[in-house]
Amino acid sequence: MDYGWDSDGITPTPCMVDRNNTFTIHYDGNIYQCPALVGQDELACGDIHQGIQNYSKQYQVKNWENHKACRNCLYLLLCFGGCRFMKYRKDLTMDIDCKKNFLDETLESFVLQDIKESKVLVRE
C-alpha cells in the first residue's frame, strides 16, 4: 500500500456511523448511530426499550475500509470516507462521500493560509 491506513485493529475514523458501539440516545428513548440523525425517527437504529437493530443493514452503510479507492487515498487520514449524514442529505444514501476532488483543489490553499495566519516562517 502506497497510501492509506492499515485498518486492522482500532478504527481511527471520527464518524460514529463507522463505529460498532457508539450511539446517541435521544431524550425520547430513540437510539441513533450519529448525533446528526437525532430527531429523524426513520433513521433511529432502535430504542431503549427494544434495543438496537441491525443498523448497518438499515442505513446501508458502505464503510471506507471496503473501498479500495479510500484505502489507497492520499487523503484518507483527513476524510475516512466523509460524513455519512452529509451524503444522506445529498442523495438519501449513507455511502462514501469522497472529498478527493475537493481536497485536490483546495488543500494547498488551506495549508498556505494556515502558514500565513500562524506567522510561521518558511525557508525556501
Image: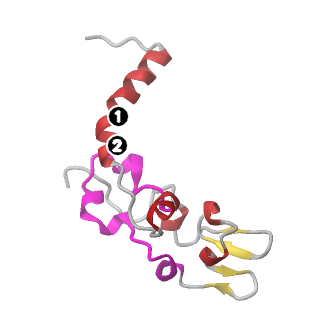
Q: Nearer the viewer, residue 113 or 16?
A: 113
On the rendered structure, is 19 left or right of 1?
A: right
Element type where label 2 sits in the image:
helix
Residue 106 numbered mark, or none: 1
- Residue 122 found in image quarter: top left
Locate the C terminus and report the quarter of the image it occupies. top left
Quarter of the image for the N terminus: give it.
bottom left
Q: Name the residue rendered at 44%, 65% in the picture.
A: 91
Above or below, 101 relative to 80: above
Residue 52: horizontal and vertical position, in percent? 63, 82
Q: Which residues are magenta?
A: 55-84
Q: Position of residue 37 (x, y in %)?
A: 62, 65
Q: At 40% across and 55% down in the image, what residue appears?
A: 80
Q: Quadrant of residue 98?
A: bottom left
Depicted 59 relative to depicted 16: above or below: below
Q: Residue at x 29, y 65 (%)?
A: 67
Q: Nearer the viewer, residue 97 or 18?
A: 97
Q: Position of residue 64 (x, y in %)?
A: 36, 63
- The amino acid at mark 1 is Thr
